[in-house]
Image (cartoon, rainbow, N blue to C red):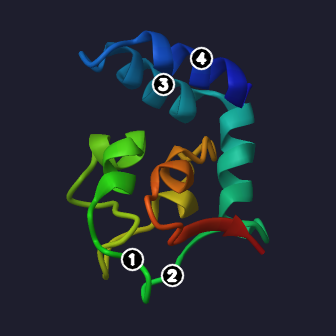
Amino acid sequence: MGLIMEMMMSMGGEDGKIKQMYQYHKIGCPIAWISGLLNKYSIFRIKLNAETCKTCGICDKQCYIVSMEPAKFSLYKPKMIAPGDSYTCSKCLKCVASCPNGSLTYKV
């Protein structure tokens, strides 16, 4: 299911219509509820090494959750919600792949 939604997100362009549909899917789909609940309790997490992070913001620019609610979510800003803990995160790991110095990892 996550693969299908990620493919749909990549076809949407920059206008945001597909992203809005994705948000609707996350709210209305029982499978999304289960995967979202598992995000809260998963042993695998997207982790930030604050010592090596250069606060460049590239990870936030790659994350569709941050782009939808930048005042609420951030991968590197302190006191903001980590998108990976949100029910809307599909663990596409674009944030991890885009980090230029490897400060983001996906592990236990």
Label 4 sits on a secondary structure element that is helix
Residue located 48% across and 18% down the image = 10
Tell whether label 1 touches label 2 (CB within 8 Å): yes
Residue 22 disc label: 3
**The one of 99 and 79 positioned closer to us in this rendering:** 99
Mark 2 vs mark 3: in front: 2
Ranked by sequence position, the earlier of labels 3 and 4 is: 4
Q: Amino acid at mark 1?
A: Cys
Cα separation, mark 3 vs mark 1, equals 30 Å
Kindly identify which residue carries mark 4.
Answer: 7
Residue located 24% across and 53% down the image = 70
Task: Point out residue 29 in the picture as x, y percentages from the top left corner.
Answer: 64, 28
Ranked by sequence position, the earlier of labels 1 and 4 is: 4
Cα separation, mark 1 vs mark 4, equals 29 Å
Mark 3 vs mark 1: in front: 1
Residue located 78% across and 75% down the image = 108
Ranked by sequence position, the earlier of labels 2 and 4 is: 4
**The one of 105 and 24 positioned closer to us in this rendering:** 105
Label 1 sits on a secondary structure element that is loop
Q: Amino acid at mark 3?
A: Tyr
Task: Point out residue 42 in the picture as x, y percentages from the top left corner.
Answer: 76, 65
Task: Point out residue 63 in the picture as x, y percentages from the top left corner.
Answer: 41, 45
Location of the N terminus by quadrant is top right
Cα separation, mark 3 vs mark 4, equals 11 Å
**The one of 57 and 92 positioned closer to us in this rendering:** 57
Q: Amino acid at mark 2?
A: Asn
Cα separation, mark 2 vs mark 1, equals 6 Å
Left or right: 39 as drawn, with respect to 88:
right
Mark yes or no: residue 58 visible.
yes
Around disc 4, counting alpha carbons within 10 Å, would you say few (fewer than 14), some (14 to 19), or many (20 or more)? few
Q: Amino acid at mark 4?
A: Met
Kindly identify which residue carries mark 2.
Answer: 49
